[in-house]
Image (cartoon, grey):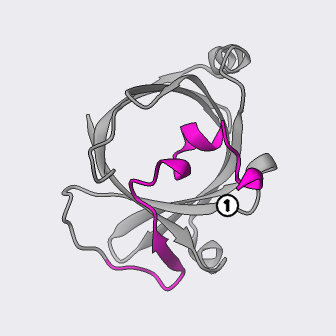
Amino acid sequence: MTEIERKFLITSEDFKKEATSKAYIVQGFLNSDPERTVRVRLKNDKGFLTVKGKSSEDGTTRFEWETEISEKEAKKLLEICEKGVVEKYRYEVPYKGNLFEVDEFLGDNEGLVIAEIELNEVLQNFAKPSWLGKEVTGNAKYYNSQISKNPYKNW
């Protein structure tokens, strides 16, 4: 139930050529407090409810619990979320034994593209593809819960 994750900006769209899947995601937050976020997500036609705890000081680690819910339940919960729903395409991109999830944001966050990699250990080494740019792990303004409140278009 502990998530270890690092985030990076993207330098080119080359990741799209390597992607093995693409999904449309709509998500909102029932609670966006940094101590405990509660997210509702609709990924294609599947719903998910996720609770995340406070991030570690370096931003790499936090508690995460997720369960699948029905599409109907997710749509109903999205109606009562805090203002600022996030829409994006998520690409899954395998690279040298690891999986990068690349989010291409839409709407008020269009132009923002972030890659995430989940790791088994905080200091785990991994190969970095050429399209991976500046690391933004731990920078709260890149958290989905924060871009729902302060979209990329306002930066």
On the rendered structure, is 121 left or right of 44? Answer: left
Nearer the observer, 143 or 40: 143
Quadrant location, the N terminus:
top left
On the rendered structure, is 63 left or right of 108? Answer: left
Place residue 144 in its image quadrant: top right
Q: Disc 1 marks which residue?
A: 112
Q: Residue furthest bottom?
A: 130
Residue 145 magenta-drawn?
Answer: yes
Nearer the observer, 78 or 154: 154
**Amino acid at pointer 1:** Leu
Q: Is residue 147 above or below residue 42?
A: below
Q: Position of residue 81 (x, y in %)?
A: 66, 19
On the rendered structure, is 144 left or right of 111? Answer: left
Magenta highlight range:
127-155
The residue sitting at 45% across, 54% down in the picture is 139
| Dot 1 alpha-carbon crowd within 10 angstroms: few under 14, some 14 to 19, many 20 or more | some
The residue sitting at 40% across, 58% down in the picture is 137
Q: Residue furthest right?
A: 107
Q: Position of residue 16 (x, y in %)?
A: 64, 72
Quadrant location, the C terminus:
bottom right
> Could you tell me how many numbered marks the image carries?
1
